[in-house]
Image: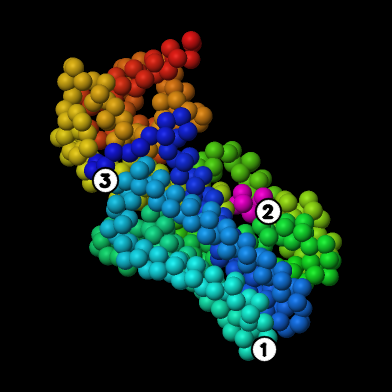
Amino acid sequence: MNFPSVDYTWFGNGTVIALIAIIHVVISHGVAIGTSVLVVSIEYRAMKKKNDKLDQVAKTMLKWVLIITTTIGAMTGVGIWFSTTVIQPDSISSLLRIFFWAWVVEWGAFISEVIILIIYYYTWDKWKEGELKRKHIMLGVALSVASWVTMVIITGVLAAKLTPGRWIETFSFWNAFLNPTYFPSLGFRMFLAIMLAISLVSFFIRWRIKDNTLRTEVFRVFAFWGAISLPMTFIAGLWYLWAIPTEAYNMIVWSTGMSEIIFKSLNILGFSILIIFLVWLAKSPRTVPWILSIAVMFSSIGFIGEFEVVRETVRKPYIIYNYMYANGMLEKNEEKLKKEGFLANATWAKEKEVNDNNMVEAGRDVFVGQCITCHTIDGWRDTRALSSKMEGWDKEAIMSFVPNMHFAQVAMPPFMGTEKEIEALATYILTELEEEEEVSTK
């Protein structure tokens, strides 16, 4: 209502956010949080066993944590802010009003994490003996805690979008932050981060370390953390599923775009690979197969990607559940906008009312305000591209569908506007579809 949304046309707005977010989550969870825990654990084991080679493995792992988190991790973090701000500005502005000070604290924790990470790495070979080594390990523990604190804060923000709980009534920060899925979501993410780290790093350990004895030492640390993390991830995941709204739970399979049998089969296969891998690590770390280390890496990336897609999609038709729809429209404004009109209340709209001379222009403003967050005129995703979904439709068909679309598609917000605005929207869509057809036939 207050801000226009940028259109990534053929590619799709949701796809842009999803790609950046998945890369960022893999790095923030699997590298910054999970791998930090593994590094400190390996350093501690190396100190106990007086194994300098094992100590250098931990240092090498930390070097890549430093490189990846301060480059790709930092850029994708900013990328999430930028993409969501221009694609879902009303949603981000609402979240900023609710969680402003939480984000301030999170940024402070992130800066602390980076400072500790740099000190931890560059003092590695200087704090090598006795009490200095113990202090160095405690520095690593502080790094793990700082990275975990960022998760503690961000989880409150993300979980509130699906289950704002009593915030809808009280508008209290604490009701939003400590929402019904906060603790299960935090537990799930925390243990999944360690599992993701084990899965990502194991491939490179298997590939780069030729010394079987040294590789065995590393894998024993991984097996210890995996034995804790995998069952806890499963338990927290079930807790999370139990805590989300029934409507959201029923959309899980649909949100992945898979049939139920494929969804179940792939998830059972992925979970089985994780179990086999951890058992192999515990029983015979010297003989972990190449193919298994690759399979477990892709399985874990698949799980985190699936979780992020599902978490985002099952909120539909909302972006903030029971408060704001995915297109930024507030649920409470539905009757007002049907009476007064969407364009008259959209601060950025060039056209404030519909007439016979501005049907296409007004329709475009309506499309940008209510459709563009999820839909494109053309594009690679048939489920989002109107050129595929509305092929062969005429103006009357579109005008009949729009007022009732939220009944036909559970993920669609209701249209908020007048009959004239529906007509303008239909006119704009048909004009664009006809132009697309002309281009494609040339």
Q: Magenta part mainly helix, strand or loop?
A: helix
Looking at the image, is mark 2 or mark 3 earlier in the sequence? 2
Residue that appears at 68% across and 86% down: 129
Q: Is residue 152 visible?
A: no
Disc number for residue 297 = 2
Q: Which residues are magenta?
A: 298-303
- Helix or strand or loop: what does disc 3 sit on? loop
Dot 2: within a 10 Å radius of its alpha carbon, few (fewer than 14), some, or many (20 or more) residues?
many
Dot 3: within a 10 Å radius of its alpha carbon, few (fewer than 14), some, or many (20 or more) residues?
some
Q: CA distance from mark 2 to mark 1?
A: 36 Å
Question: Label 1 belongs to which residue?
Answer: 130
The nearer-to-camera label among 2 and 3 is 2
Establish if 290 lies above or below 41: above
Q: Are marks 3 and 1 in contact (CB under 8 Å)?
A: no
The nearer-to-camera label among 3 and 1 is 1
Horizontal relation, residue 169 to residue 84: left or right:
left
**Which of the pair 199/244 is nearer the observer?**
199
Where is residue 108? Give x, y as percent: 40, 69
Looking at the image, is mark 2 or mark 1 earlier in the sequence? 1
Dot 1: within a 10 Å radius of its alpha carbon, few (fewer than 14), some, or many (20 or more) residues?
few
Disc number for residue 330 = 3
**Which of the pair 365/59 is nearer the observer?**
59
- The residue type indicated by label 1 comes to Gly
- Residue 381 on the magenta segment: no
Residue that appears at 59% across and 38% down: 259
